[in-house]
Image (tube, helix red, strand yellow):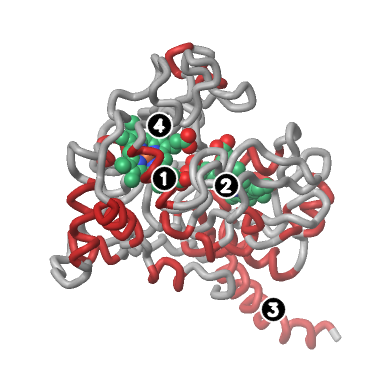
Amino acid sequence: MVSNFRGIKPLLLATLLLVLFACSKAPTPYTWPLPDYVPKPVVPKDNPMTEESVLLGKTLFFDTALSGNNTLSCSSCHAPEYAFAEPKPVSIGAAGDALNRNALALVNVAYNATFTWAHNNLESIEKQIMIPLFNEHPIEMGVTGNEQQILARLNTPVYQQLFEQAYSTKAPTMDAVVKALANYVRSLVSFNSAFDDYAYAGNDDALTAQQIEGLNLFFSERTECFHCHGGVNFTQSSKHSFQAFAVQPFHNTGLYNEDGKGSYPASDMGLYSVSHNKKDMGKFRAPTLRNIALTAPYMHDGSIGSLEEVVEFYARGGNKANELNPYRSPFIKGFSLSESEKAALVAFLNSLTDEKFLKTHNRHKN
Ligand code: HEC
Ligand code: HEC
């Protein structure tokens, strides 16, 4: 008997070593699918981008197991078909609570200097993700109080392997869940629209004559669009590896003027609701306009239904433009465009849709 065991020992040892080797295999650094003209986003030092963490994050993103009552996934409100936004004016949480805001498209979030429609003190995607997971007023995914149950749901052989490969822990932890989700969100980069083909790859045929007319209007002093939706990501609020400091401006577009003195509805006063500084009344982040054709309805509360109506809104200089409004940005001053110019501006916005992004990030492919 004893000698039999001796024969088996080296084999056992070899197997053990092999298993150890397989387990300690370092995660693969993530390859950013970015064109040359786009700088890499800044990634937190304690959560490096790896292929394995992005895969784990993707699997979690589409899984209802992450909500307390197992009904809602991140993708319920951020659906890939709509560039990770949703067609409802405002989102509905797992317990049926209506949120006061429209789901933001998750497009180039990695480049945002600030997160959500209006917050100047949420400095990482990791922190932002805690909100839908743990928020109680209103409940979004309803994780609070259900943490152990959710981690137990994730304790399957498939997840154990994904967690092990990404974060060297077989047992799922909330810390690893949040980190993996953040890395998946960071991987949602979109720079392959017809506009990019025209503007950066030098393909003169990529845009129609009407879209080029719209492009010129967008970047003109007549409409002022580019002042707030500027740069490679069509938002001024950005941060990337070529830039020493993050820029985080917020603007009041004159969407509301409740009292003829510029105030916004009490349910959502934008940055003012966070800072309580009067000058921040009604200020919101100008979101990226990439893939904008897919993310209707528009604005922080989904109150504008179509791009045509957005253009009309800016053309009249915001809502109640004739009433006093000390908060409205001086760049929102109204303009007059002919019907065909308005159509050209919308045609240009449509050229910012990235078909390759939609194909790469459809919900079925892993
Ligand atoms: C009930 C709908 C809902 C669910 C579920 C949801 N979100 Fe959101 N998400 C929103 C809304 C609404 C906003 C805008 C919030 C705001 O401005 O205050 C948002 C904003 C975000 C942002 C900020 C994007 C930016 O550009 O600043 C990120 C990142 C995000 N969500 C990721 C996630 C992840 C990851 C999950 C899953 C853990 C998730 N969301 C689940 C509705 C939802
Ligand atoms: C003063 C800065 C500013 C200017 C100028 C400006 N925008 Fe905006 N834009 C914003 C802000 C801020 C928001 C979000 C407002 C809100 O949700 O209340 C926004 C929202 C939008 C949205 C909706 C985005 C979404 O995801 O729902 C579109 C589309 C848009 N702008 C297009 C344009 C066009 C086209 C022009 C030029 C005609 C323009 N913007 C000019 C700041 C600006």
Which is more N-terminal, label 3 or label 4?
A: 3
Circle 4 or circle 3, nearest the eye: 4
Position of the N terminus by quadrant: bottom right
Amino acid type, mark 1: Val
Q: Position of residue 104 (x, y in %)?
A: 52, 46
Tell whether label 2 touches label 4 (CB within 8 Å). Answer: no
What residue would you read off at disc 1? 310
Element type where label 1 sits in the image = helix
Horizontal relation, residue 355 to residue 157: left or right = left
Circle 3 or circle 1, nearest the eye: 1
Which is more N-terminal, label 2 or label 4?
A: 2
The alpha-carbon separation of the residues under discs 4 and 1 comes to 10 Å
Q: Which mark is residue 170?
A: none
Q: Which mark is residue 103?
A: 2
The alpha-carbon separation of the residues under discs 3 and 2 comes to 53 Å
The alpha-carbon separation of the residues under discs 3 and 1 comes to 68 Å
What residue would you read off at disc 4? 318
Q: Which mark is residue 12?
A: 3
The alpha-carbon separation of the residues under discs 4 and 3 comes to 74 Å
Q: Position of residue 58 (x, y in %)?
A: 57, 62
Horizontal relation, residue 289 to residue 336: left or right = right
Which is more N-terminal, label 1 or label 3?
A: 3
Which is more N-terminal, label 1 or label 4?
A: 1
Amino acid type, mark 3: Leu
Element type where label 3 sits in the image = helix
Element type where label 4 sits in the image = loop
Amino acid type, mark 4: Gly
Is residue 221 shown to the viewer in this render? Answer: yes
Which is more N-terminal, label 2 or label 3?
A: 3
